[in-house]
Image (tube, rainbow, N blue to C red):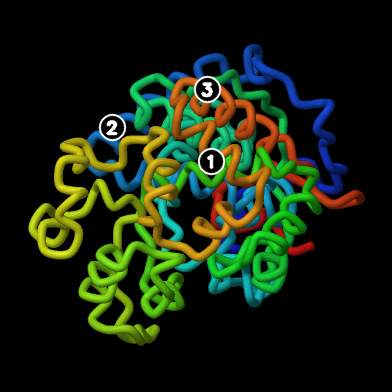
Amino acid sequence: MTTKLVCLLVVVVFAAAATVGAGELKVGYYEKTCKDVEKVVNSIVVDSVKGNRGKGAGLVRLLFHDCFVRGCDASVLLEKSEVNRRPEKDSGANIGIRGMDVIDAIKAALEERCPNTVSCADIIAYAARDAARYLSRGGVDFAVPAGRLDGVVSRSRDADTYLPDAASNLTDLVRNFRRKNFTVEELVILSGAHSIGVTHCTSFSGRLTAPASQINPGYRSLLVSKCGGVSPTPSSNPTVVNNVRDEDAAAVARSLPAFVPRLRKAKDYMDNSYYHNNLAKAVTFHADWALLTGKEARGHVVEYAKNGTLWNLDFADALVKLSKLPMPAGSKGEIRAKCSAVNYHH
């Protein structure tokens, strides 16, 4: 219904616009057409994240889950419709995806100020930067180049194909990132985002029975207790914080007493603690631990454990590169009126 409604109400913009190439994105893109766009985005992001820091983690994740599939085209936001019967949202790789309500609030505010001007894809990029900056207390910051268009295609099978599997080994991870022109170093850098956020037990079920050579046995028993056993199912699938330092003190004291002094008062604080946790074999995903199995990747884990400021800078650069991933050649694009639906039937 919403798709048809949008059809009737919205003037079709960029009816057959070609993909905007990465080279055409620029900082200050909306200076003349929607002057305070970044102020509007930042204000809504900060208000949302102050109320729920987890939403900030969701916004950072949203950028990766959008851009790594069909380029940065906001295809991850599209709901099921006649045009896209099984959208990316339906993919198992997108379980627990969140932050869309924040994107919708930003879009509504911007449509009031500058109708049909700012793409949902650009909003995702601005919001991810602002969330990362807030959660890192200013440590991660960068200028966002803009000028993206919103895609009209969203397929769960594309998300299944391109998003890395949390149970991947290092060879598969390196191949997956290389396909998008990201290096081993950038794989390690972007993995550092696992210092924040939550995950579902089914996403790391293999870790619940992994050997002590791969996971700290105390951390493993903590995860088993959080997941209600070693065999979580989709029907009984609790969430667990990605960062052991964000766990509740009682659970850590029981299973992993040595980590009690490392617990943090501010949860979802984006920093280099992920690398320290990884070297202590206290990380949730097999794909996290897998970074220790190759000489180059492990070297970067050690490097960022030693130097949090370097990680802040390199993570910012990696997010800029991620935000420039283009749509597939020949894709159609538009400025959506509503981020969850295409403007009209293509």
Question: Which residue is at the front of the view, 269 or 253?
Answer: 253
Image coordinates of residue 189 in percent, x first then y, are 58, 38
Q: Is residue 190 left or right of residue 157?
A: left
Question: Which residue is at the front of the view, 65 or 20?
Answer: 65
What amino acid type should be assigned to the residue bearing mark 2? Asp
Q: Which mark identifies residue 47?
A: 2
Q: Residue at x 24, y 34 (%)?
A: 50
Q: Is residue 300 above or below residue 312?
A: below
What amino acid type should be assigned to the residue bearing mark 1? Val
Q: Residue at x 35, y 32 (%)?
A: 135
What amino acid type should be assigned to the residue bearing mark 3? Leu
What residue did someone put label 1 on? 301
Q: Is residue 103 visible?
A: no
Instruction: Name, please, the residue furthest toward the right.
Output: 330
Disc on the earlier residue, 1 or 3: 1
Q: Residue at x 66, y 36 (%)?
A: 323
Q: Which mark identifies residue 310?
A: 3
Q: Is residue 310 visible?
A: yes
Q: Is residue 326 left or right of residue 93?
A: right
Image coordinates of residue 38 in percent, x first then y, are 50, 21
Q: Is residue 195 left or right of residue 24?
A: left
Q: Secondary structure at mark 3?
A: helix
Question: Which residue is at the front of the view, 26 or 315?
Answer: 315
